[in-house]
Image (spheres, grey):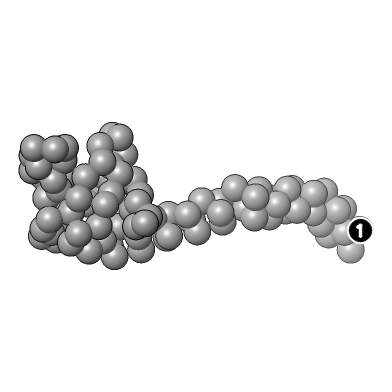
């Protein structure tokens, strides 16, 4: 009985530290990934976006995982992957 108590007493701090790390680091990261995935899947034609490469553009069409965006005054069209969307700009 004393051995079990000693093992639990020694293991308890490790369990507490691992639980704290999960709540501090892993859980928030999973939440951010879920929000990012939802944002990327809800992109609509006409949305102004910023790519992770720093390019601002307007979505003109989409096919599964490929988006076509218009960039610049000349309205140059670029094809980008859906995962390359950094954020959707707020419409004013």
| Residue 80 drawn at (x, y percent) | 16, 45
Say whether residue 63 is visible: yes
Q: At numbered mark 1, what does the secondary structure look like: helix, strand or loop? A: helix
> 5 and 45: which one is in front?
45
Asked which quadrant contains residue 65, the reply is bottom left
Residue to which mark 1 is pinned: 2
Residue at horizontal 13 percent and vertical 45 percent from the top: 70
Relative placement, left or right, of 23 versus 4 is left
Q: Quadrant of the N terminus?
A: bottom right
Residue at horizontal 26 percent and vertical 41 percent from the top: 56
> 92 and 90: which one is in front?
92
Q: For the image shown, how many numbered marks are present on the structure?
A: 1
| Residue 42 drawn at (x, y percent) | 29, 65
Label 1: how many Cα within 10 Å (few below 14, some 14–19, many 20+):
few
Asked which quadrant contains residue 90, the reply is bottom left
Residue at horizontal 79 percent and vertical 54 percent from the top: 12
Residue situated furthest top in the rendering:
53
Relative placement, left or right, of 88 versus 60 is right
Q: Is residue 69 above or below residue 35?
A: above
> 15 and 92: which one is in front?
92
Residue at horizontal 30 percent and vertical 44 percent from the top: 50
| Residue 75 drawn at (x, y percent) | 9, 42
């Amino acid at each position: 009985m004393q051995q079990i108590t000693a093992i639990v007493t020694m293991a308890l701090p490790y369990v507490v530290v691992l639980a704290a790390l999960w709540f501090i680091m892993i859980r928030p990261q999973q939440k951010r990934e879920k929000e990012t995935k939802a944002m990327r899947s809800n992109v609509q034609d006409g949305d102004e976006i910023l790519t992770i490469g720093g390019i601002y553009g307007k979505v003109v069409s989409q096919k599964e995982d490929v988006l076509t965006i218009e960039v610049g005054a000349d309205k140059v069209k670029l094809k980008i992957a859906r995962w390359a969307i950094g954020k959707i700009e707020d419409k004013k």
